[in-house]
Structures are given as C-alpha cells and as structure tokens.
Amino acid sequence: MNKKEILAKTVGRRKEAVAQVQLIYGNGSFIINNKPAQLYLQNSSNSIFSIKAPFEILKNIENPNNYKMENIDTFVKVQGGGLVGQAEAIKLGIAKAITSLDEFSFKNSLKKKGYLTQDSRVKERRKYGLRKARKAPQYNKR
C-alpha cells in the first residue's frame, strides 16, 4: 500500500460550518487547517472528544481491513461558523469517511450512535418590521 493513499474524502456540514475531511494512511495525526486539532480547537475537551468519537467504532468493531485510529491520519479543511459548529461538522465528516471505508462494517453502529445524522438546524432569518427573527417592538395600545 502506498503511504500517501487517500482512504476516504467526505464533507460534513453544521450551521454555517463546512468541513472537508480526508483520511490517509499514516501515524494517527489529526490536523485541522494545518494546525494540530488540540491547538485549533483551543484545548476544548468537549470538542476534541466529540471529533474523535467516531473513531471509537474502529476499536469496538472487528473490521475486515483492520483499520485502526493509530494508522490513519486525518486532514480537515474547515471554514465558516464558530468552533462548536465546526467541531460538529468535522464529526459528521469523519463519520461519513469511516462509513466509506467499509460500509457494511461501520454504518449500522455509527447510525445507532447518531454520528451519521446531519443536524439541519440553522439560524432563522430576520423579518422586516421586527428587531430579530421573532422579537417585535413593544405594542402600544394608546
């Protein structure tokens, strides 16, 4: 196998954030926008745990190609939104990428954990005559 062989390429989205994820054979590094994941996510333990959660499936399930988190480098380009939205977009992108590695082995377990469900909630647009999406000026009867 070629060391720079791309295993999977997918896209994850959440709110305004779009994450392009690539899984490549390597030594287990996790790079987001050319920075280590811990540095990019500002050591936010919840976000770091969230983005690495889909890889736990690789440990728990016996897979035919013997994929392990230690052997896979993850490269992510993400833009738009805030850090939490970006972390959720990355998590979805990684889950989709793992599914594309071997659909039959991983898809059911990822689906049960909820990693393949896209959260489509976005900010509601502002309407004319209102201060925000739903906040109206105070009503004056007299």
Image (spheres, helix red, strand yellow):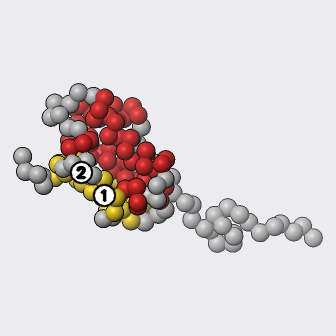
**Residue drawn 6% across the image and 46% down it:** 1
Dividing the picture into quarters, in which one does residue 116 lie? top left
The vertical placement of 67 against 26, above or below, is above
Q: Position of residue 22 (x, y in %)?
A: 24, 54
On screen, residue 113 versus residue 4, left or right, reads right
Residues at circles 2 and 1 in contact by the CB criterion of under 8 Å: yes
64 to 20, vertically: above or below: above
Q: What residue type is labelled 1?
A: Ile
Residue 31 has which mark?
A: 1
Residue at x 71%, y 63% (from the top left corner): 135
Q: Name the residue under label 2.
A: 73
Residue at image x 69%, y 70%?
131
Closer to the N terminus: mark 2 or mark 1? Answer: 1
- The quadrant in which residue 54 appears is top left
What amino acid is at disc 2?
Asp
Label 2 to label 1, Cα distance in Å? 8 Å
